[in-house]
Image: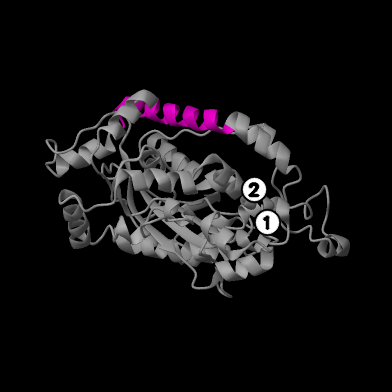
Amino acid sequence: MEFRPVGLEAWGVYIPKERHTSEYISKETGIPKNIIEEKFGLLGKTIPGPEDHTVQMGANASFQALKRAGITPDDLDVIIWAGEVYAERPLVVNGIKLQQLLGNPMNSWAFDVNQRCGTFLVGMLIAKSLIHTNPNINRILVASGYRNCDLINYKNQRSRFMISLAASGVAAIIRADYKRNEILGISAISDGRFADDVYVPAGGTIQPITSKALDDGLLFLDVPDPEGLKDRLDKYSMDSFVRVIDKALAQSGYTREDINYLESIVKELNLIDEVVFLNHLSEKQMIEFYSNMDLIVLPSLHEAFGLVFIEAISLGRPLLVSNQFGALSFIEKPGSCTINDFVFNPTDVSELCVKLIEYFEGKGVSGAYFKELYLENFNKEFIYKKIKEVLKFS
């Protein structure tokens, strides 16, 4: 059966102005500021202001998406609320509330879907399915708002992995017969073994809201069995990620081998003769590859940690590395050189050229220095110590 192509016509976002800084979060949680910033990766987060209600934030994002698409709310056929149920008021159909905030367009009808962190994905899946099954549906708004940061108790150690929960709104216009930004296969799975792992204890039929529940802080998100959750995530999550990826690829007519985004960029930039893709290398092949390099340059604009940096210096290979590598923050003993001797700004071509010339002239930092840097800062005992520091505050 031939289906109409479905694509993302436009999108919009809304970000509140209010913030919780890493310093504030550190004070409230008791976790050192450097741990918040370097281990949690959290310099700050958005929180809602007085007017930043859940559906309202989704509406703000929706107006931006509509403007970008060059259409009005009257051009919509369906409105899907794919945001949180924690919103302006309990037991409201938030899709209809969004319809109201958009000026109450009467050409569309609205409904809600909810799947926590997977809600927007499910909303897009339903939008695509509606277009495929109903020839009269041509444009669908999928919108979300979120402020579950209100439900985080910074003092609760069991829920610390959720301290980054913030506030925002997002919206997407899904359009029929649209081949730009085409939405291909979407796959989703759920697992009942995780159904009771994260919830707000009070406020439902099992434990109604009482003054004692309020006093006991039972209106915040909690994790009753954090160790059990971790064990089950370790056992099942990776396989689940692989399953949905493979299913989505299969629905789209592709396999993992067809994922060649970087190769397409290389072709577009006419650099085919300059770039070589090595594909998967065994451990032995990786060691041989690194060992054959006279100089390794790592120019990433952002790198949360950067394992390739550790691999290179463990083998004593000379390198120049972007100052955006997170691994650099772990260096406490730089040795006989300074970090600036081998670090550069990835947006400053002239700085990189100067440092490259130093290597060409035999004046660059030696491989022996990098080997020593690895032994002093990334040996097993040192890493164990760092892990213990993290566990102490998590």
Identify which amino acid the numbered label 2 is placed on.
Answer: Lys
* Residues in magenta, as a range: 237-259
Q: Secondary structure at mark 1?
A: loop
CB under 8 Å between callouts 2 and 1? no
Q: Residue 252: x percent and y percent?
A: 35, 29
- Compared to 363, does 130 lie above or below? above
Q: Residue 89: x percent and y percent?
A: 66, 63
Quarter of the figure with residue 367 = top left
Identify which amino acid the numbered label 1 is placed on.
Answer: Leu
- Residue depicted at 67% across the width and 33% down the height: 192
- Which of labels 2 and 1 is toward the front? 2
Q: Label 2, on which residue?
A: 388
Neighbour tally class for label 1: few under 14, some 14-19, many 20 plus, Cα within 10 Å:
few
Q: Secondary structure at mark 2?
A: helix
- Residue depicted at 39% across the width and 26% down the height: 283
Checking the image for residue 91, the label placed there is: 1
Residue 315: tell me if it is visible: yes
